C-alpha cells in the first residue's frame, strides 16, 4: 500500500494537470470567443453597410421611377403633338396639292422644287418639265402655255438637236425635209419619246445611269406598225439604219448598248438604244428622277 504522503503527491499532481488543462482550454475558449466577437463585429459592420446600400438603392429606384413617369408623360404628350402635327401637315399638303393641280390645269407653270410630281393629281396624269430663260425648271401640263407669260419656254430652232427639229415637224413637212425613211423613222421615234399624244411609244424607263431605252426587237415591231406592209426582213434592216440615224441626228446624245437577254431558257445578245441620265438634251432637264412606274415619255412625269 502507498503511504499517505505518496497519495497526497499523486492527488496534487493530478489536480495540477487538470488545472493546467482547464487553464489551456479556458485560454483557447477565450481566443475563440474573441475571434467570434471580431467576426460578429465585422458581420455587423457589413450588415450596416448593406443596409445603407439598400436604402440608397431604394432611394435611387424611387427617383428613377419618378423620372420614368415623367418621361412617359412627356412621351405621351410628344406623341400626341406629333400625330396632330402630321395630320395638320398632311392636310395642308393635300390642300396645297389640290391648289397646285387646279393652277396647273388652268395653264400655270410651277417651279419644280415646289411640286411633288409623284403625288399631285392632274388631268391626264402627266406633267412636263421645262426650262425657261430665267435658268429655272418648271412643271406644266404638256404643251401648256403660261397665261402669265413669266419667261419664254421655247428654245430657238438653232438650239435644238437635228432630231428634235425633225420631230417637231408635221408629217408633210417631215417628208419634204427628209428623203430617207430611216431619218423619218428616227424623227418619229424621238417624237414618240417626247410627245405623249403619239401613243405608240416603244421607249421604256431605265434605272441608275440609263434614263430610257428601247430594244432593237421592239423597234422592229414598231417600224412595221409605222410602215404597214413592211416585211419582217426589211424591218430588221431598217432597225440598224434608223439607230444610226438617231445617233447621228442626236449628235450622239444617245448610245447603243448590248445586253444579254434570256428567252425560253436560251441566252442571246440584243442591242439597245439608250438615253443616259446625264445626256444634255436642249429643253430637257439632265435630272431623270424616276421610278419603275414613272413616265412613259422623257421629260413628262406622271403621278404614281
Image (cartoon, helix red, strand yellow):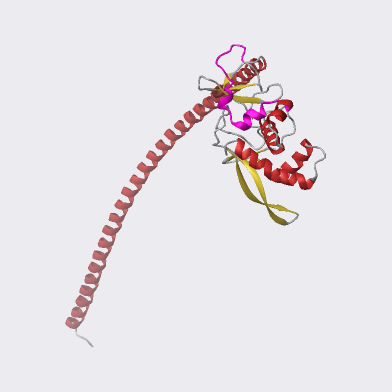
The picture quadrant where one finds residue 252 is top right
Horizontal side of 85 relative to 294 (left or right) equals left
The residue at the far left in this view is: 5
Residue 271 or residue 277, whichever sits in front: 271
Horizontal side of 86 relative to 221 (left or right) equals left
In which quadrant is the C terminus drawn?
Answer: top right
Whether residue 24 is situated above or below residue 120 in the rendered picture: below
Q: Which residues are magenta?
A: 146-171
Residue 116 or residue 58, whichever sits in front: 116
Residue 169: % across, % down: 68, 26
Residue 70: % across, % down: 47, 28
Residue 237: % across, % down: 72, 46
What residue is at 78 percent from the left and 40 percent from the top? 224
The residue at the far top in this view is: 148
Whether residue 22 is situated above or below residue 201 in the rendered picture: below
Residue 185 or residue 210, whichever sits in front: 185
What residue is at 30 percent from the left and 52 percent from the top? 42
Residue 83 seen from this side: no
Residue 170 on the magenta segment: yes
Residue 55 on the magenta segment: no
The picture quadrant where one finds residue 201 is top right
Residue 242: % across, % down: 68, 40
Prevalent SS, magenta region: loop
In which quadrant is the N terminus drawn?
Answer: bottom left
What residue is at 79 percent from the left and 46 percent from the top? 232
The picture quadrant where one finds residue 66 is top left
Residue 234 or residue 199, whichever sits in front: 234
Amino acid at each position: 500500500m502507498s503511504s499517505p504522503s505518496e497519495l497526497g503527491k499523486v492527488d496534487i499532481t493530478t489536480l495540477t494537470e487538470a488545472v493546467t488543462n482547464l487553464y489551456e482550454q479556458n485560454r483557447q475558449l477565450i481566443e475563440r470567443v474573441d475571434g467570434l466577437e471580431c467576426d460578429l463585429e465585422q458581420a455587423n459592420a457589413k450588415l450596416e453597410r448593406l443596409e445603407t446600400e439598400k436604402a440608397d438603392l431604394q432611394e435611387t429606384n424611387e427617383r428613377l421611377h419618378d423620372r420614368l413617369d415623367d418621361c412617359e408623360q412627356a412621351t405621351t404628350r410628344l406623341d400626341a403633338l406629333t400625330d396632330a402635327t402630321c395630320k395638320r401637315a398632311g392636310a395642308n399638303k393635300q390642300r396645297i396639292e389640290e391648289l397646285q393641280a387646279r393652277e396647273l390645269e388652268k395653264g400655270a407653270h410651277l417651279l419644280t422644287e415646289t411640286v411633288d410630281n409623284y403625288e399631285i393629281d392632274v388631268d391626264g396624269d402627266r406633267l412636263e418639265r421645262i426650262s425657261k430663260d430665267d435658268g429655272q425648271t418648271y412643271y406644266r401640263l404638256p404643251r401648256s402655255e403660261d397665261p402669265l407669260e413669266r419667261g419664254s419656254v421655247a428654245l430657238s430652232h438653232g438650239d435644238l438637236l437635228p432630231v428634235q427639229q425633225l420631230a417637231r415637224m408635221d408629217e408633210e413637212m417631215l417628208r419634204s425635209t427628209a428623203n430617207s425613211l430611216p431619218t423619218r423613222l428616227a424623227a418619229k421615234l424621238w417624237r414618240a419619246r417626247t410627245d405623249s399624244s403619239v401613243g405608240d411609244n416603244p421607249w421604256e424607263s431605265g434605272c441608275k445611269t440609263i434614263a430610257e431605252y428601247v430594244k432593237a426587237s421592239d423597234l422592229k415591231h414598231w417600224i412595221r406598225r409605222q410602215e404597214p406592209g413592211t416585211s419582217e426582213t426589211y424591218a430588221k434592216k431598217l432597225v440598224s439604219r434608223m439607230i444610226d440615224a438617231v445617233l447621228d441626228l442626236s449628235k450622239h446624245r444617245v448610245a447603243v448598248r448590248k445586253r444579254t437577254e434570256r428567252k425560253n431558257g436560251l441566252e442571246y445578245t440584243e442591242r439597245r438604244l439608250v438615253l443616259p441620265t446625264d445626256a444634255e438634251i436642249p429643253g430637257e432637264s439632265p435630272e431623270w428622277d424616276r421610278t419603275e412606274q414613272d413616265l412613259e415619255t422623257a421629260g413628262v412625269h406622271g403621278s404614281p
